[in-house]
Amino acid sequence: MGFPPVHYGGLMVYATDLSKEQLKMGHNVIMLMPGIYNGKGKSKIKFFKVQEKLPVYQIINSHPVNLSGIGNPSDFIKEKKENNYRDFLKKNNIEILHVHSLMGFPKELLDEAKNLGIKTIFSAHDYFGLCPKYRLFKYDGTLCNDFNEGKSCVLCNYEASNRAIKSRNLLIVFPLGYRILRKTYQLFKRSSRQSKKEYAEKKYYQKLVFNENKAIKFVEFRRYYIKILESFDFIIFNSSVTKNEFSKYINLNKLKYKILPVTHSSIKDNRNVINYKPLINGKVNFLFMGGLVKGKGFYDLVSILNEIKKTHTNWQINIYGNYSGINLDNFDNNFFKFYSKYSYKDLIDIFSNSSVLIIPSKWKETFGLIGLEAFSYGIPVIASENVGFSDLLEDGKTGFIYKEDSENEHLKKIIIAILENPYLLQEMNKEIKRIGFKYTLKHHVNEIILCYKNLLEEKL
């Protein structure tokens, strides 16, 4: 998807760290990202720059990239008949085409690779292709379990525009200047954001109108990407949650695949670095890290804790995330402690002051690297069954996995059980330290390379 400031997040970190480690091992690696898009003329792969010792190429006029939704699905499935994809693949003697997202990915590139006998792998980090907004989470804050072959996507993408596509073009061409202008604009708008938030959300729901013609285009969009997915030689799912969601829409019985948890270069075995204590200043210190949004389960968690504090007061929750759009006056500061965004160097201090991490996602989170980061420091984790990281937990021994229910009773019971016996967490910390730690980048990359080798030898 590109390097910062074009793209941030776990996918960028993972794909970059994987490539850098492969380069260290002596492999020839090229990074390829969707580039400038204007929708006109030939699509071509062109050298962009060298970043972190990796040669980076961009696909000019590939499909557009818009993380906030799709206004016109036809733009995202246009044929790229005029292209130089074949020449690029042959010139660079590509043996493996490893795709990490279908955003901006043209079907013709996959077709050319297969025509040349190049092996193709897809690593599923998000749900784009199945979901235009890549999360399978609806506009009304509920899971998307049936999008009617794509027709229902018209509602979630009702107000999507091309602004993000234009902004991305500017970031690629003029990164520093664009960031300065954007920061100035955000500071100007921030003061009025909160007061308008609830009104805008209510107005959005009232405006929704089903457009049958556009709905048919979303059906075509879905079929286009499902065809791409079913054409890969091999698929790597980062969790059983991801695999299960994809299996609802593509036929895995006809595909070769593997479940392989992800990691990144900064994750080390730090389980004995901090002196773990379940109680800090006499309290259980819960930890929440991430977006303060419905999909991440933040507001459900707040609701549960507000109810629990009526009977149990031996706790506080440390919240790390962007709280600029939230009115902190609505939170009891004796219990709710807000901190700004964090960087990786802050983690040792954050985890040293934490009893247990809570990942209460409402959407089907494909993995959740923050869970593995906590694990690497010996911190127990409470995770929703919606979180892919829960694959690595042993329920009741290294953490808790709870079932989703409409009243959040399962999560509430776990939190109360911890507050009534905090030393459950001490035993979990001991168990985390006892088991083997096989989640370093080097170990992971060796598994990826093995997938490549087996695929090249057609053993898979």
Image (cartoon, rainbow, N blue to C red):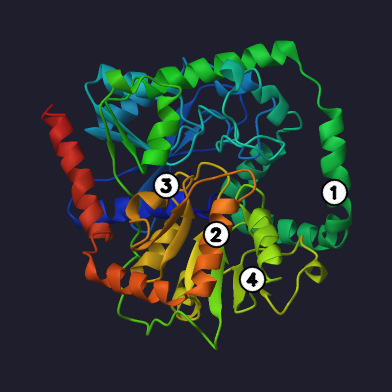
In the image, residue 270 above or below residue 142: below
Contact check, label 4 and label 3, Cβ < 8 Å = no
Left or right, residue 38 beside residue 247: right
Front residue of 332 and 161: 332
Residue type, mark 2 in image = Lys
Residue 170: give x, y in percent of width and height: 64, 46
Label 4 or label 2, whichever lies nearer to me, is 2
Q: Residue at image x 50%, y 80%? A: 353
**Residue 198, label in figure:** 1
Left or right, residue 452 beside residue 426: left
Q: Earlier in the sequence, mark 4 or mark 2?
A: 4
Residue 322: give x, y in percent of width and height: 66, 63
Left or right, residue 125 beside residue 193: left
Q: Earlier in the sequence, mark 3 or mark 2?
A: 3
Query: What residue is shown with label 4?
Result: 340
Front residue of 288 and 68: 288
What SS does tag 1 mark?
Answer: helix
Q: CA distance from mark 4 to mark 3?
A: 25 Å
Q: CA distance from mark 4 to mark 1?
A: 23 Å
Q: Quadrant of residue 154?
A: top right
Label 4 or label 1, whichever lies nearer to me, is 1
Residue 49: give x, y in percent of width and height: 43, 50
The residue furthest bottom is: 281
What SS does tag 4 mark?
Answer: loop
Front residue of 59 and 354: 354
Q: CA distance from mark 3 to mark 2?
A: 22 Å
Q: Answer few, some or many: residues within 10 Å of disc 4's Cα (few below 14, many 20 plus, some between 14 and 19).
A: few
Q: Which quarter of the image is occupied by the C terminus? A: top left
